Amino acid sequence: MTMTRNIIIGALLLLMLADAALAHEAEGFAGGFVSGLLHPLFGWDHVVAMVAVGLWGAFLGMPAIWLLPVVFPLVMALGGAAGVAGAPLPAVEAGIGASALVLGAMVALAARPPLWAAAVIVGVFAVFHGHAHGTELPHAANPLAYSAGFVISTGLLHLSGIALGLAARWRSGRMAIRAGGGAIALAGAGFLTGVL
Amino acid sequence: MTPATVLLLVAALCVLPVTADAHSPVEGMNEFYNGVIHPLLVPAHLLLILATGLFLGQRGPRENRFGLPAFFLASIAGLLMTGFAAAGTVEAFVLAGTLAIGLATAAGRRAPLPLYPAAGAFAGFFLGLDSTPESLAGAERVLALAGTGVGLNLWLIYACGIADFFSKKHWQRIGLRIAGSWLAASSLLVLALTTSSR
């Protein structure tokens, strides 16, 4: 009887084990950063849309080639902040699928709207991508590291699109980029219809 | 002694109170060096130092002439006032500072001259204020705060130097602006999370 009582008391004491109180959130930094970095890469809908932004920026030339990578993360963060704050955004997944369709079509058609119109189109879709990332934020091991990870990852995807888009200076390169845009638009249609 | 009694004793020893660590100090390093690397271990501090360094270094020495001294004086003031700040209240200011200074860096325009020392003072004060070494007292606390003061200013000078070095060519200045927008975007999200969870 005494032994049983001691085991129960011991088990209860073990349940009282507490971690050290941490004033900052430095713990889990690496995990949070890596999960943020990988989050956009694990979704094909995010990847193709971000590459399309870079391709279109390169196609449009100066100053769009560098303006879009500056503006996109900021607008995306606004969408993410809205998601964190609980502001509802209808049809987030459809918006992300539509971003691949529309941005891919812009590249395929070699569309050259005014810079402000291109920025508005990209900005509207950035809100959907940001909202989708933002909903993951409260569950991250370290929210700030997660945010930095996914912002950097998104930016690097833009840069990879811009790097590919630099081939636009050659005639054959322009054809290849437009074909790539067409493939992205088709993928977007696949996301929207549920085929992909 | 029965196994149950041994278990009871071990469990009782396990629940002895442990030191509350502010940010997992690195074992084997004294308080001063832990203070020096403190800004690198706290992501929010690191981002504000980077944002301030990029902002001040983006322009020439004319703006830095007042920005760096303002940061230095304000960081000392913040460190001296660490005991007066309630835990968890200062980080929002650190994130808001990163957002504002990151946006100013992303804008890439020459700001009014007083804005540079103002940004330095804001960043220095709140970084210092948010660097409370909770578990330390007496000489150890003074050493940790002194180390943090050295670290804050040292890492800022490095960030300024890197930004200044990479601000000569057009594409380098674009790179600095992109980095500023990334810093602002990261801090905006966490600021939203911090304010929405209150």
Image: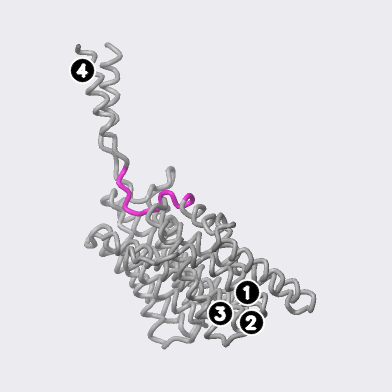
- Which numbered disc, 3 or 2, marks the residue that appears first in the sequence? 3
The correct choice, above or below, for B16 with respect to B19 in the image is: above
Q: Residue at x 22, y 62 (%)?
A: B84
Q: Where is residue A74 drawn, in percent x and y?
A: 46, 73
User: For the residues marked 3 and 4, what is the alpha-carbon distance in whole angstroms?
Assistant: 70 Å
Q: Tell me, yes or no, whether the two marked residues, 1 and 4, touch with CB atoms within 8 Å.
A: no
Q: Where is residue B138 drawn, in percent x and y?
A: 26, 51
The residue that mark 1 highlights is A105
Query: Of the numbered discs in the image, which one, if any, rests on residue A111?
Result: 2
The answer for which chain carries disc 1 is A
The residue that mark 3 highlights is A67
The correct choice, above or below, for A44 with respect to A128 in the image is: above
Q: Tell me, yes or no, whether the two marked residues, 3 and 1, touch with CB atoms within 8 Å.
A: no
The answer to whether residue A184 is seen in the rendering is: yes
Q: Tell me, yes or no, whether the two marked residues, 4 and 2, touch with CB atoms within 8 Å.
A: no
Tell me the crowding category of disc 1: few under 14, some 14 to 19, or many 20 or more residues within 10 angstroms, Cα based.
many
Q: Residue at x 38, y 77 (%)?
A: B119
Q: Tell me, yes or no, whether the two marked residues, 3 and 4, touch with CB atoms within 8 Å.
A: no
The answer for which chain carries disc 4 is A
**SS state under label 1:** helix
Query: Of the numbered discs in the image, which one, if any, rests on residue A5?
Result: 4
Q: Quarter of the image containing the C terminus of chain A?
A: bottom right
The answer for which chain carries disc 2 is A
The span picked out in magenta is A20-31
Is B133 part of what is drawn in magenta?
no
Snapshot quadrant of residue A165: bottom right
The answer for which chain carries disc 3 is A
Q: Are marks 2 and 1 on the same chain?
A: yes
- Which numbered disc, 4 or 2, marks the residue that appears first in the sequence? 4
Q: Where is residue B17 drawn, in percent x and y?
A: 25, 37
Q: Quarter of the image containing the N terminus of chain A?
A: top left
- Which numbered disc, 1 or 4, marks the residue that appears first in the sequence? 4
